[in-house]
Amino acid sequence: MPDRGKIDSETFTELIAPNLGADREDVVIGPQHGVDFGVVSVGEQAVVTATDPISILPSLGFERAGRLALDIVLADVAVSGIAPTHATVSLSLPTEMSDAQLGEMWRGIAGHADALGVSLVAGHTARYEGVDYSWVGAATGLGVGDHEEVIRPDGAQPGDEIVLTTGPGAEVTGLFATLFPDAFDLAPETVVTAQERVSDILGVADATTVTRAGSPTAMHDATEGGVIGGLAEMATGAGHAFVVEREPAPIRPGVEAVCGAVGLDPWRVSSAGSLLVTAPPSETTAIVDGLENRGTPAAVVGEVRAADEPGVVLDGERVSPPASDPAWDAMARLQASVE
């Protein structure tokens, strides 16, 4: 049975990559496994585009769930160095979703778009039999800017330092503590603290802060596969080794307790909102300061080195990304424990 979550690089290479429609010269960056965005040249400008599923978890509250869902889509544009400007949203909703709940969710989506200066320009909204929460559609984000402003996903260079924002595991921690608050043998105040990690998922503003504060060479949102998965994708794209230490990384309150309670390594689970940034050492102090000034913890956790074999070295040991995100199995176990 195939793994849950994103397909692996072998499946992508075999089934998807050879079949990409017309070979057009205006495609500057096309689909690549582990790359957040594509780039199309239109006239003299670069149009950055990214598509992600829309996940709505009613337990988060419909307005907050809508806000988070859109931010995760737009973050994949923002890591290009081009701020998102437009989006399209397609919603295939469960039949039990009421108009009131739809209104709350849409206020979250549209309100967040407005706050980010993003226009919602097209979409589709319908209810269908057979649709369940949480996967209820998809959205495409767009950003328009100058070609020289695009930060390539494979742009990391030897000598660059590696900055991690927010730290590993915050997304999974916040979601699990919110969805399954009674499933953990933890003090109630620890669960409440862990629930606050949902607010750490928002990454567009952090990506924008990075590009304003310094000159990053590459940027990536650590989603499925977590920080280790994100580092591996960046290292493979750049063709270099990413040498990282755990000790300086920011760890948000509640992460270790919740991940430990379900046997998860925070470094290997989905961490949407946690950005990985590479930049010359002369730039990283300003980048970290800019992030911390807006309330996002960040730290230099390693460096990029030239290597015959690209990959990730964590605390002195070469590591591989998980074949599939272990949070999927953990969520299934937690769901079963409360049913």
Image (tube, helix red, strand yellow):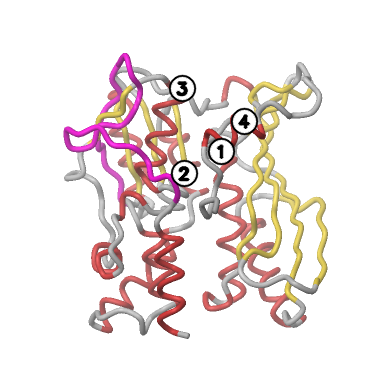
Where does label 1 land, which residue?
36
Relative height, residue 203 to residue 301 (above, below)? below
In terms of sequence position, does the residue under pointer 4 or pointer 1 come before the other? 4
Tell me which segment is drawn in magenta. Answer: 297-324
- Residue 123 lies, with reference to residue 182, above or below; the image says above
Q: Secondary structure at mark 4?
A: helix
The part of the image, by quadrant, that contains residue 111 is bottom right
Q: Residue at x 17, y 45 (%)?
A: 247
Q: Nearer the viewer, mark 4 or mark 3?
A: 4
Label 3 to label 1, Cα distance in Å?
13 Å
Q: What amino acid is labelled 3 in the image?
A: Gly
Q: Nearer the viewer, mark 2 or mark 4?
A: 4
* C-alpha distance separating marks 2 and 4: 25 Å
> At 58% across and 77% down in the image, what residue appears?
58
Residue 55, x across and y down, in percent = 60, 63
- The CA distance from mark 4 to mark 1 is 19 Å
Q: Which mark is residue 127?
A: none
Q: Which residue was labeled with disc 2? A: 221
Name the secondary structure under disc 1: loop
* Amino acid at pointer 4: Glu
Using the image as rendered, state which of residue 310 and residue 74 is in the foreground.
310
